[in-house]
Amino acid sequence: MRHVAANALTLLILLVLGLAVVAGWGASQWRGEGPLEAPAEVAIPRGASIERASGILEEAGAISDARIFRLGARYSGLDRRIQAGEFAIPPGTSMRDVLRCLVDQSTCRRVTYPITVVEGMTVWEAVEALRDAEVLTGEIEAVPPEGTLAPDTYAVTRGDSRAEVLARMKAEQAERLAEAWAARAPDLPISTPEEALILASIIEKETALPEERETIAGVFVNRLRRGMRLQTDPTVIYGITEGKGPLGRGLRRSELDRRTPWNTYRIDGLPPTPIANPGLASLMAAVRPEATDHVFFVADGTGGHVFAETYAEHQRNVAAWRRIEAERN
């Protein structure tokens, strides 16, 4: 009996030692330097289980053993907290840090892609850009109202939904409009944030020069105060294209004469909607215009405009601009 007991004790000791060796080896594999010799980008799809994620990581060469990775994830209680997305994993990252990468990106960075809405882009153009972005998912059921998307560059990750990105753009523009409206000057000839958005969109389309925005805003405010028509070409163009891409040619006399809701040569006051998505600078110009006596402006041939207080002065400026156009042609 003593011999049997001794053998059993010996086997138990060997088993414990073996388990200790295995555990030590597993721990070294878990915490030790990983197999990656160069950075790797790994995509974990939405809804992936720890089994699928570990297989993807092993196949990509980010971890050496999917089984140890799964055991470590479950032991740490993080197996159900892994996130979907694309992750840039640095070389030599341990399995423990690969898991932390997938949970909170504390040991790596998430791969992002830029989606840019430039100032003056229409909602139709912005929605088309989102639809063309292959990294995004889902459909856009309806185009938002004109002017309600904030121009900016948005960082998105593969698998983000188009609807979510669109909601971010709308929320940002609503916040910017509220900020501008709260800072508005007194006694403006506009009475609602929506009218400020319309005016800002016209300013955005009239000039690309930051230093001109407040002056052009002052011209339009003066015209509104005096009951003059705005007479701005970008609104006429919007009435033709409805924001679905550029016109691609000059305006015709028949188009200037044609009455549409946006033709400010034919209607009084502001058009019924914005004509583009204005940036924050144009929003601020619309509510805090320059105090000026100017009521006219025309292109000056250098990318900017020349301003005038009287119609006679304006006619001279127009004639100068036509001479510039003739010389160019």
Image (cartoon, rainbow, N blue to C red):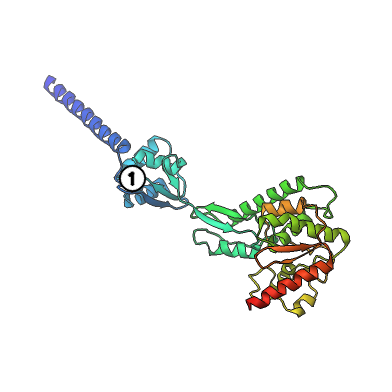
Residue at the spot x=14%, y=22% of the render? 6
Amino acid at dot 1: Pro
Residue at the spot x=14%, y=25% of the render? 7
In the rendering, at what x and y percent does residue 168 appear? Answer: 61, 51
In the rendering, at what x and y percent does residue 4 appear? Answer: 14, 24
Looking at the image, residue 73 sits to the left or right of residue 65; the answer is: right
Give the camera-side residue of 134 and 234.
Answer: 234
| Residue lying furthest top | 2
Looking at the image, residue 176 sits to the left or right of residue 218; the answer is: left
List the residue tagged with mark 1.
Answer: 91
Residue at the spot x=81%, y=59% of the render? 294
In the rendering, at what x and y percent does residue 96 appear? Answer: 36, 38
Residue 142 in sight in this render: no
Q: Secondary structure at mark 1?
A: loop
Give the camera-side residue of 300 and 173.
Answer: 300
Q: Quadrant of residue 314?
A: bottom right
Give the camera-side residue of 63 and 116.
Answer: 116
In the rendering, at what x and y percent does residue 189 appear? Answer: 84, 55
Residue at the spot x=66%, y=58% of the render? 209
| Residue lying furthest left | 3
Residue 97 in sight in this render: yes
Q: Estimate how packed mark 1 is, as few (under 14), some (14 to 19) or many (20 or more) residues with alpha carbons within 10 Å.
A: some
Give the camera-side residue of 21 and 268.
Answer: 268
| Residue lying furthest right | 226
Q: Looking at the image, is 71 positioned above or below residue 181?
A: above
Looking at the image, residue 307 sits to the left or right of residue 115; the answer is: right
| Quarter in which the N terminus is drawn | top left
Q: Quadrant of residue 9?
A: top left
